[in-house]
Image (cartoon, rainbow, N blue to C red):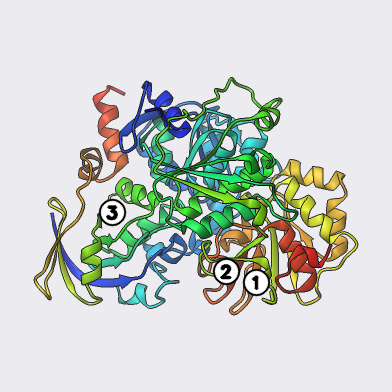
Amino acid sequence: MKLKGKVHKFGKDIDTDAIIPARYLNTFDPQELARHCMEDADPEFPNKVQAGDIIVADKNFGCGSSREHAPIAIQGARVACVIAKSFARIFYRNAINTGLPILECPEAVDAIEAGDEVEVDLESGTITNLRTGQMYQAAPFPDFMQGIMAQGGLMNYLKEKLSSQGN
Amino acid sequence: MGMTVSQKILAAHAGREKVEAGELINCKLDVVLGNDITAPPAISEFKRLGLKQVFDRDRVVLVPDHFTPNKDIKAAEQAKILRNFARQYDINNYFEVGQMGIEHCLLPEQGLVLPGDLIIGADSHTCTYGALGAFATGVGSTDMAAGMATGEGWFKVPETIKFVYYGALPRWVSGKDLILHTIGDVGVDGARYMSMEFTGEAISALSMDGRFTMANMAIEAGGKNGIFEVDDKTIEYVQGRAKRPYRIFTSDPDAPYAQIREYDVSKLEPVVAFPHLPENTKPVSEAADVSIDQVVIGSCTNGRMEDLQAAARLLKGRKVHPELRVIIFPGTRQIYLDALRQGLIEIFVEAGAVVSTPTCGPCLGGHMGILAKGERALATTNRNFVGRMGHPESEVYLSSPAVAAASAIKGRITPPWEID
């Protein structure tokens, strides 16, 4: 699957409170959460983000809380994928479990600028900066995680597994 | 090559003799935890599976602690989802307001988490239970849903960093100071994906409450879990609480460590983390003179008896600074009762602090002490991210209860030795 979108760039250690502040966690509705997505990192983000846009961030994206509301808010804002130098562990897990595409690629993060148009091939993990024509290769996911992502998240994967066991 | 304690617990729960760092394994879970923020999405996902029961109704724990007592209508609806689910699925360990506490103070106190356990919780501070020699880690709501359904979870076996603390702890230096100092040293992603194993003579000398505080903040260094050796103090704590058998695991002498870091604690002084990351640490003597508007003492990090006692020792017979609010949160109903019986609540109220029922409240900017634009708080909590306790242009500093209490009296960040 190929994605193409405009880049919004963020710095290092973007925490889950910046992605979706706890004051909005009295709901888990994706659209409501999307209205405040990234608000404490960039108050204008919820207004300017367009469907299919891509978040590019430095190291340790999603550090802090275990709130799955973070990837849900990003998906609610219709962001197509997140590229970062590295992801915090729980966010990484939550993104895979909920079907938000994420890629780890430090070289791409260094080279890509805000506003660039980027193409991402999720199967091969290649990232192309359409402004410069440069290509980058993200680290591949283990087969097990690819299996979860291919099913659209952990619950679909589990549903499949449970039904095949006759439950 | 041997295994670390974390690897041994994972191997035992995967039915394996041995596991190595980097392996993806499937494990049986001892406890699955959720709260009023993370459980509602998990319950919604769980119901999609169409199962008639959870994997074990004694091993699913639901604690409405974040936005309770309900802060607004939406929060009330979320708490209701939890309550209804607990009734419908006959969950034995649901803790209603009045019985509950902040989850990571409550579960150890109730003997629900034990040495050698493998625990997942839909809350990042689930790593707290590592103080008991358990492997405990935070996950999201979907993992919680899968855990409630199957009693299993997938894990990548982590590498381990061993942290060795030697020397005698100086007066005023607590578990909070050790962990803040450690996070200041390795950074907020210094232990990303890794186990943090805490050991050394200063750890042996540390109380259980101090160990809970340290394990609690492993996540603030990016750690997957933080873990301590089981010793006499652990056994003493667990005895009388445990209602089921438990196992003690220890790291092999030839266990593989990605890093070993050593600290001489005898040279430390209390530590303060400046905004907006827990890694921005300074010794308290270099933090003095930062004026503050609010002090918060409590939370899953520092809401235990020893924490309240440390604050009370300084506040006894003194008054909080007139230009500052002090809010104190005992971690559980039992801690509240103990504090009441020991006269601590009276000391706090006489001093001019307010004492709340247990709740996560202000720690995550939920309720019960939100900061206005430009305000500054000193808190014994665990995170000082932008907007963490309220307005995005407010600030949070992190410290031990002793530094927080001393600062409450002076109205600025203050070393405890200036008071006592």
- Residue at x 19% of width, y 75% of height: A116
Kind of residue at disc 3: Leu
> SS of the residue at dot 2?
loop
Residue occupying the point 37% across, 78% down:
A44
* Label 3 chain ID: A
Q: Amino acid at mark 2?
A: Phe
Taking the image as drawn, is residue B54 in sight?
Answer: no
Which numbered disc, 1 or 2, marks the residue that appears first in the sequence?
Answer: 2
Is the Cβ of the residue at disc 1 closer than 8 Å to that at disc 2?
yes
Residues under labels 1 and 2: Cα distance?
Answer: 8 Å
**To which chain does the residue with label 2 belong?**
B
Write down the chain letter for disc 1: B
Which of discs 2 and 3 lies nearer the camera? The answer is: 2
Quarter of the image with the C terminus of chain B is bottom right
According to the picture, the residue beneath numbered tag 2 turns out to be B274
Q: Are marks 1 and 2 on the same chain?
A: yes
User: Which residue is the site of mark 1?
Assistant: B287
Label 1 Cα crowd, 10 Å radius (few <14 / some 14-19 / many 20+): some
Tell me residue B25's x, y (percent).
Answer: 33, 31
Do labels 2 and 3 touch, CB within 8 Å? no
Residue under the image location 82 percent in, 55 percent down: B312
Task: Residue A100: give its label.
Answer: 3
